[in-house]
Amino acid sequence: MIVHFVQPDGSRLDVEVDPGLTIMEAAREANIPGILAECGGGCICSTCHVIVDERFFESFPAKEPTEDMLLDLAPGRTEFSRLSCQLELSADHEGLVVTIPDEQPEY
């Protein structure tokens, strides 16, 4: 399946992804710039912050309180912000578009 990563400058990187990976894992495997993922997917930082296209937002489970708290630290948080380490991809996510914010927090 294809996931579209939109960079802050508007350019788009289309990546072939296997279902079962998280968005963060897919981004790291494809060397997508802007997704730092400093904690490696442990949901203890917010350096994998992405903005999920609103058409797909509800297709993922709701945020847990820890994720919501960490997103408060993420620059550019929107109502469609999520931590990409918490979003497992399935076949239903074919064509998913995620936008990488202008900046990620620094730790």
Image (cartoon, grey):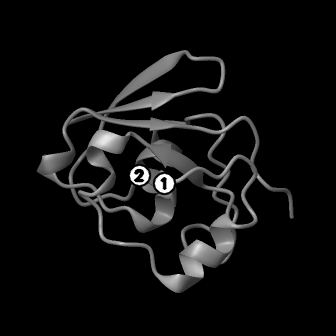
Residue lying farthest to the right in this orientation: 107
Q: Are marks 2 and 1 in contact (CB under 8 Å)?
A: yes
Amino acid type of disc 2?
Ile
- Quadrant in the rendering for residue 73: bottom right
For the point 46% across and 31% down, which residue is it? 5
Q: Nearer the viewer, residue 13 or 52?
A: 52
Report the disc number at residue 46.
none
Which residue corresponds to mark 2? Answer: 23
Q: If the image is split into quadrants, where does the C terminus sit?
A: bottom right
Q: If the image is split into quadrants, where does the N terminus sit?
A: top left
Residue 42 shows up from this direction: no
For the point 54% across and 48% down, which residue is it? 50
Residue 19 image position (x, y, % from top left): 21, 53
**Quick check: 42 above or below 71?**
below
Residue 103 image position (x, y, % from top left): 76, 41
Amino acid type of disc 1?
Met
Residue 63 image position (x, y, % from top left): 44, 73
Q: Nearer the viewer, residue 47 or 38?
A: 47
Locate residue 38 relative to residue 65 in the image: left or right.
right
**Secondary structure found at label 1:** helix
Residue 103 shows up from this direction: yes
Q: Nearer the viewer, residue 97 or 1?
A: 97
Report the disc number at residue 24.
1
Residue 80 image position (x, y, % from top left): 48, 51
For the point 76% across and 51% down, which residue is it? 75
- For marks 2 and 1, give the CA distance: 4 Å
Locate residue 30 relative to residue 18 in the image: left or right.
right
